[in-house]
Image: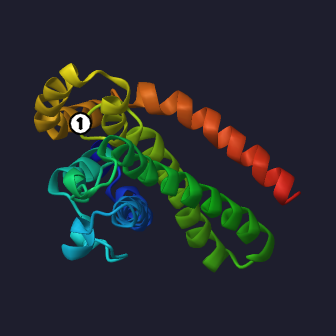
C-alpha cells in the first residue's frame, strides 16, 4: 500500500477513505467480542478498563496502525484478560480467543449480504459507488482479519489456542515467543509473507460465502 502513496497519491487517499472505516469496524468488533466473552466467563478486566465499547479509540494499537498505513493491514490492542478470574482458564482462554475471529467471520458475511442488497436497491451512482466500496472493504477486511488471527503465532488468537493442544512443558516457550510477537507480525505483514497464508484461505472462504449468499438471495 505504501508504494501506492508515491505512485498514485490520489488513489491512495481514495482507498484510505474506504479502508479506515473498514479497519476500525473490524478491529473494534474483534476486540469487543473478546472482552464480552471474557466478561461472560468471569473476567471483568476488559469491562473495568473500558474496553467493552464500540468506540474504536481504546482498541487502536500503534504498531498495528503503522502496519495498516504501510501495508494496508493491521491489528488492534489486545483486550486484557486475567486468566485467574476464569473458572476453567485453559478452556475459557480458547473460547475467548475464538470469539474475535468468529465475530469477524459473522460481520464479513453480513457485509456481503448488505453489499448484494445494495446492488439491487441502490441505483444512484453518486451514492452507490462509495457505499458499495465501503461494504466491499468491510467484507474483505473482516474476512482477512479473521483468517489472519487464526495463524498459530502468539499473540494472535491462533497462538492462544496452542496451550490447549500443546503440553504444559511448552507453555514457557510460548510465553517467551509472545513477547516478540508484535515485532514478528510487523515484519511478516510489511514483507507480504502473510499473504501466502491468508490469500489461499481467503479465496476459499470468500467463494464459500458468495455461494451461501446466492442461496439466500438469488440474483
Question: Residue 95 placed where, x, y %?
Answer: 42, 48
Q: Quadrant of residue 174?
A: top left
Nearer to me, 201 or 89: 89
Residue that sits furthest to the front in the current view: 87
Split into 4 quadrants, where in the image is the N terminus? top left
What residue appears at the point 88 percent right and 57 percent down from the top-left corner? Answer: 218
Render colour scheme: rainbow
Q: Residues within 10 Å of mark 1 (few under 14, many from 20)?
A: many
Q: Is residue 151 above or below residue 211?
A: above
Q: Quadrant of residue 139?
A: bottom right
Q: How many marks?
A: 1
Using the rendered image of the protein, determine whether residue 60 is visible from the camera's viewpoint: yes
Q: 162 left or right of 171?
A: right
Q: In x, y percent, where is residue 35?
A: 33, 64
Residue found at the far right of this picture: 218
Q: 70 or 201: which is nearer to us?
A: 201
Residue 50 appearing in the image:
no
Q: Residue 72: horizontal and vertical position, in percent?
A: 34, 48
Q: Residue at x 23, y 25 (%)?
A: 168
- Identify the image quadrant of the C terminus: bottom right
Can you say whether 119 is above or below 92 in the image?
A: below
Residue 69: image location, x then y, percent: 26, 53
The residue tagged 1 is: 185
Location of residue 165 with respect to 67 vertically, above or below: above
Left or right, residue 219 beside residue 173 = right
Residue lying at 71% horizontally and 79% vertically, measured from the top left: 124
Residue drawn at the location 38% of the way across and 42% of the way down: 91
State the SS at label 1. helix
Query: As rendered, which of 218 and 42 lies closer to the eye?
Result: 42
In the rendered image, the vertical position of residue 18 relative to residue 52, given as above or below = above
Amino acid at each position: 500500500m505504501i508504494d501506492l502513496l508515491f505512485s498514485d497519491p490520489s488513489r491512495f487517499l481514495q482507498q484510505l477513505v474506504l479502508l479506515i472505516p473498514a479497519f476500525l469496524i473490524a478491529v473494534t468488533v474483534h476486540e469487543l467480542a473478546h472482552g464480552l466473552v471474557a466478561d461472560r466467563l468471569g473476567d471483568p478486566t476488559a469491562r473495568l478498563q473500558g474496553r467493552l465499547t464500540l468506540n474504536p479509540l481504546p482498541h487502536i494499537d500503534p504498531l498495528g496502525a503503522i502496519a495498516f498505513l504501510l501495508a494496508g493491514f493491521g491489528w488492534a490492542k489486545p483486550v486484557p484478560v486475567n486468566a485467574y478470574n476464569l473458572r476453567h482458564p485453559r478452556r475459557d482462554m480458547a473460547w475467548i480467543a475464538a470469539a474475535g475471529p468468529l465475530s469477524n467471520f459473522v460481520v464479513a458475511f453480513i457485509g456481503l449480504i448488505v453489499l448484494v442488497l445494495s446492488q439491487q436497491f441502490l441505483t444512484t451512482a453518486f451514492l452507490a459507488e462509495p457505499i458499495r466500496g465501503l461494504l466491499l472493504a468491510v467484507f474483505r477486511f473482516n474476512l482477512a482479519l479473521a483468517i489472519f488471527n487464526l495463524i498459530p503465532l502468539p499473540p494472535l488468537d491462533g497462538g492462544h489456542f496452542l496451550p490447549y493442544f500443546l503440553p504444559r512443558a511448552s507453555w514457557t516457550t510460548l510465553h517467551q515467543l509472545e513477547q516478540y510477537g508484535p515485532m514478528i507480525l510487523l515484519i511478516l505483514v510489511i514483507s507480504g509473507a502473510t499473504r501466502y497464508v491468508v490469500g489461499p484461505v481467503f479465496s476459499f472462504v470468500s467463494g464459500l460465502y458468495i455461494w451461501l449468499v446466492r442461496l439466500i438471495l438469488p440474483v
